[in-house]
């Protein structure tokens, strides 16, 4: 993964491509665009609409529109304690992971970016090498370690490793941000009587907000969508299912109620909503974060 | 000196949390995996159960490589890896080239094609699992279009399931690839295309000889991400296919590792699989960086901090 992460990946509104000499291409392009969009969004819409159907209706005519439209599935899910338990658990995990990643990552990146000391390069290389240690590889021994530490089966057993594995990307994205702020500003602040800590809080932090938001979103989405770690740490522990995080809860619900397809569809759609809303709210930032993180 | 000591203290205090977390929960587990892989460990293992009597040398490794199921898992993983490169890559580049022009609804289109990528892999998997049931939406549409001969049990047919999974993975991840390519295309100055057009190049020639070479760095980065992702595929396979069928025909390295190490209660053997997966990933990643990414990353990974 590239580390040349200048905070510039923003997908700006691009200048128009040169006008085509042939106009036959244009309808074709729209057709392709339409097909791609339909394929991307179709299954999601199917699941949403399916949530309004009775199971009998679904069995009789799997591809049709609801006949009749019913709200039973949604009511059943929305009044279920386990759904809200799952949501709360996911929110708690994602918020704690994000906070931990941003704070710990920012502190380390600050030192790497703005202090001169022996071992600075080694420190950066160490964190960058973390990209070579994906969670999948470490997950199994990690659960054994957590069991030894007594964290197995707890939320902290998901949060703490979640923070640790998000640190490399965070530090790699934040370091150039923090370094980009010119030394002259720091000197000016010092001349005006600011201490290093004041400079950090009053100047550096506000100026690096875009970078912080990007890494925050990446950490949040990563934690929210995470499945392997909760599977190994929580589902094999003694925590009751209604307090499992959402991805685990959804899979569990769909196996348990596999005969009640309507309810499974409603549960799945409701589980999608938070990610979709979050994404719509932060679309630009996610896209630029991802593309920026990949290629500055 | 007071100031120097203070600076040193700041450095230590600021780096400590990240460093402790990173070493304790990223590096140590991987090192532990290497240790565990030489032992025959019981389910529900704790550190204090590690004793010399359980030492088995290289047994776990020889066992892994002589187990047909694991060899199949390696083959499946590499199928996903190469299929992703060969199918998703050209598809994403093609679509991006087509969409890289002024058109109505560009913003909304970009939003829509990114939706699958934002969903959790588990949710995407469950969505398709529902759609691909024998009496689910896909088969109903196939029948309605008069293509009844295509009616299949997509995720329960051992011959088909792996291809179905690859299709779902493509659905989930191609939006990201397209957006990445579109972002890369913005770095290609459109004056070049104009100049080529003036010189009499056709649209295809312009794309082939001007745009594509300039897009190459983006393609190489995407390929790298795709390779690393393919080697880790777990969630999708785990949630879409029934365990018996998975063991028969769609096991990947990651699912095999979790299955053996956690649910079959053999942490030592599972750790050996983790180590194998780690070395395969590391070798491929470093090799790819040397061969393909060296130019793109010059001055970033290689040099790191200025």
Image (cartoon, rainbow, N blue to C red):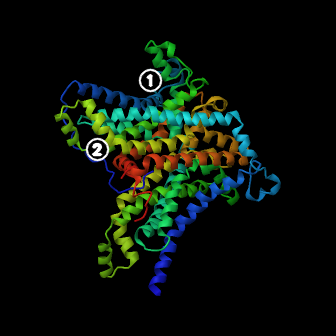
Out of B263 and A156, give the one closest to the viewer.
Answer: B263
The image shows residue B199 at horizontal and vertical percentages of 18, 34
Side (left or right) of B109 relative to A104:
left
The image shows residue A286 at horizontal and vertical percentages of 38, 48
Side (left or right) of B263 relative to B298:
right
Q: Secondary structure at mark 2?
A: helix
Q: Is B149 drawn above or below residue B8 in the view shown? A: above
What residue is shown at x 35% (from left), y 41% (from top)? Answer: B181
Name the disc covering residue A66, or none.
Answer: 1
- Let me know if residue A266 appears in the view: no
Q: Secondary structure at mark 1?
A: loop
Determine the residue located farthest toward the right in the rendered image: B53
The image shows residue A239 at horizontal and vertical percentages of 65, 49
What residue is shown at x 73% (from left), y 45% (from top)? Answer: B60
Determine the residue located farthest toward the left in the rendered image: B198
Q: Tag 2: Cα neighbours inside 10 Å, few (<14), some, or many (≥20)?
A: some
Side (left or right) of B104 relative to B182:
left
Q: Chain of mark 2?
A: B
Side (left or right) of A120 relative to B158:
left
Name the disc covering residue B186, or none.
Answer: 2
């Amino acid at each position: 993964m590239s580390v040349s992460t200048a905070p510039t990946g923003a997908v700006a509104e691009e200048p128009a491509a040169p006008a085509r000499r042939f106009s036959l291409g244009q309808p074709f392009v729209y057709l392709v665009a339409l097909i791609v969009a339909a394929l991307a969004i179709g299954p999601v819409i199917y699941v949403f609409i399916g949530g309004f159907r009775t199971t009998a209706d679904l069995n009789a005519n799997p591809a049709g529109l609801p006949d009749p439209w019913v709200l039973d599935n949604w009511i059943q899910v929305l009044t279920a304690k386990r759904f809200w338990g799952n949501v709360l658990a996911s929110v708690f995990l994602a918020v704690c992971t994000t906070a931990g990643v941003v704070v710990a990552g920012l502190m380390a990146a600050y030192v790497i970016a703005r202090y001169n000391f022996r071992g600075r390069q080694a420190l950066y290389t160490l964190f960058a090498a973390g990209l070579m240690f994906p969670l999948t590889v470490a997950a199994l021994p990690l659960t054994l370690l957590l069991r030894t530490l007594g964290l197995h089966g707890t939320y902290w057993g998901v949060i703490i490793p979640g923070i640790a594995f998000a640190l490399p990307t965070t530090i790699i994205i934040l370091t150039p941000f923090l370094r980009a702020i010119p030394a002259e500003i720091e000197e000016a602040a010092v001349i005006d009587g600011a201490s290093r800590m004041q400079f950090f809080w009053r100047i550096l932090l506000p100026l690096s907000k875009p970078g912080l938001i990007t890494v925050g979103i990446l950490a949040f989405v990563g934690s929210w969508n995470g499945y392997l770690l909760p599977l190994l740490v929580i589902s094999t522990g003694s925590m009751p299912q209604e307090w499992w995080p959402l991805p685990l809860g959804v899979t569990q619900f769909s196996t348990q109620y596999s005969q009640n397809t309507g309810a499974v569809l409603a549960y799945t759609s409701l589980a999608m909503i938070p990610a979709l809303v979050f994404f719509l709210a932060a679309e630009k930032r996610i896209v630029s974060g991802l593309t920026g993180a990949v290629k500055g | 000196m007071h100031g120097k000591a203070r600076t040193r203290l700041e450095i230590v205090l600021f780096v400590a949390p990240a460093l402790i977390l990173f070493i304790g929960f990223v590096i140590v587990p991987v090192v532990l995996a290497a240790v565990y892989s030489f032992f025959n460990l019981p389910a529900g293992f704790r550190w204090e159960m590690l004793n010399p009597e359980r030492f088995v040398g290289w047994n776990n490794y020889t066992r892994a490589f002589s187990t047909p199921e694991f060899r199949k898992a390696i083959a499946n993983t590499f199928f996903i890896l190469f299929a992703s490169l060969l199918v998703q890559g050209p598809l994403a580049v093609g679509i991006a080239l087509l969409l890289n022009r002024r058109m109505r609804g560009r913003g909304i289109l970009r939003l829509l094609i990114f939706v699958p990528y934002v969903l959790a892999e588990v949710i995407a998997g469950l969505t398709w699992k529902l759609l691909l049931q024998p009496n689910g939406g896909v088969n109903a549409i196939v029948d309605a279009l008069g293509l009844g001969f295509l009616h299949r049990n997509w995720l329960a047919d051992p011959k088909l399931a792996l291809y179905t999974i690859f299709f779902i993975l493509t659905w989930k991840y191609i939006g990201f690839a397209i957006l990445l390519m579109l972002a890369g295309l913005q770095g290609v100055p459109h004056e070049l295309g104009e100049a080529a057009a003036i010189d009499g190049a056709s649209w295809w020639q312009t794309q082939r000889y001007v745009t594509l070479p300039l897009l190459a760095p983006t393609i190489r980065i995407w390929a790298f991400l795709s390779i690393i992702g393919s080697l880790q595929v777990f969630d999708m396979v785990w949630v879409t296919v029934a365990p018996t069928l998975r063991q028969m025909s769609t096991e990947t390295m990651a699912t095999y590792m979790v299955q053996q190490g956690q649910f079959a209660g053999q942490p030592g053997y599972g750790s050996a699989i983790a180590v194998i997966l780690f070395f395969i990933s590391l070798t491929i990643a470093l090799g790819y960086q040397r061969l393909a990414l060296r130019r793109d990353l010059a001055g970033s990974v290689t040099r790191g901090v200025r």
